[in-house]
Image (cartoon, rainbow, N blue to C red):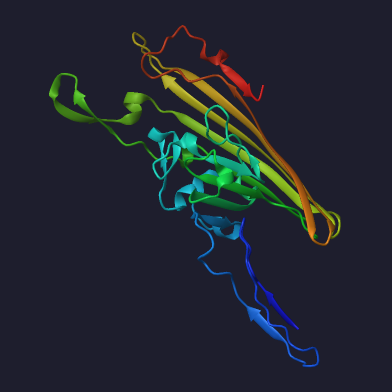
Amino acid sequence: ASYMKDIIVKLEQTITVDITMTPGVIEEQITVLGRSPLIDVKSTYKGMVLSREMFQMLPKGRNFDTLVTAVPGVSNEPWAGGISVDGASGAENMYYIDGTDITNMVLGTRGQSAAFEFVEEIQIKASGYQAEYGGALGGVISVITRSGGNEFHGEILGYYSGPSLTGTERNILRQKPEDVSQAEYVNYEHLMGKERSQRYEVGFSLGGYILKDKLWFFGSFLPVFNNITRPVVFPGDTDATEYTRKWKYYNFQGKITAQPFGSLRLSASFVNNFSKRKGDLAPRTGGNPDTDYSAFGFSFPN
């Protein structure tokens, strides 16, 4: 008998495996350990596929799109509206999670998020992709979420960032008020005030089987709480007034995978990123002290 193992098939990749059959009367076994070639000669797109094992070792943020800049020609450009692929604006990309288009219909940016702990694979296409992505003038970012298996696995996670983990801001170079022909460095916090930001994340995930070899599940829940406080001194005042903006994100996702027949696998998944903002920050300059910034806020989706 002849067989091959440890063959990795990435997202949207077709691999041809050539096997030479031997007569059954010959007691011979051939074991070939190999990987698919690093260069796919049948594909024209420029991009990269990141597996779960790979992006766990890379420096990244808390969302899947922070690794897109690992592809040549892709950069995070604020003046272009976010992720810029080969010079295109951030509104010209397309985003997919489990094959579903999650691109924001109004802004053209990412409409949903998924934490790395709940992602199995990320595919980034910068150019040369198929005609099915006709709405993309920049890049195409596809995410495959994790699935359950024949064993139960779960995890509990937590993240925190705050003032105690934040470095000191650099001093600001400005013209001297009494002599504009000279410059001076001014302490950032003395001039702008010390803004405090705290972020908490705590969540869990669980995956396993409902029917072994037939039906599997995976679910996760990750709430995020982000509070920002800014002191502002209005003209004519001597004391600072503090304003706080509070963000609450309730991220949860679930996935059901079924294999009713040997060659047929079906899956259904959902991702939700409900968010709520309470209060707003007064601008450091040009703000109105009579404005009730604590009354600002919204929920998404409403």
Where does residue 238 sit, x and y in percent of width and height?
A: 36, 13
Instruction: State which quadrant residue 274 falls in.
Output: top right
57 is higher (above) or lower (below) than 20: above
Q: Is 238 situated left or right of 172 in this image?
A: right
Instruction: State which quadrant residue 100 falls in.
Output: top right
Q: Can residue 109 be spotted in the picture?
A: yes
185 is higher (above) or lower (below) than 30: above
Q: Quadrant of the N terminus?
A: bottom right
Where does residue 7 sit, x and y in percent of width and height?
A: 64, 70
Q: Is 184 situated left or right of 82 in this image?
A: left
Where does residue 75 sit, x and y in percent of width and height?
A: 41, 45
Counting labels gives 0
Q: Residue at x 44, y 33 (%)?
A: 81
15 is higher (above) or lower (below) than 207: below
Toward the front, the furthest residue is: 131
Comparing 20 with 144, the one in front is: 20
Q: Quadrant of the C terminus?
A: top right
Comparing 99 with 223, the one in front is: 99
Toward the bottom, the furthest residue is: 26
Instruction: State which quadrant residue 134 falls in.
Output: top right
Q: Residue at x 42, y 9 (%)?
A: 288
Q: Residue at x 51, y 37 (%)?
A: 162
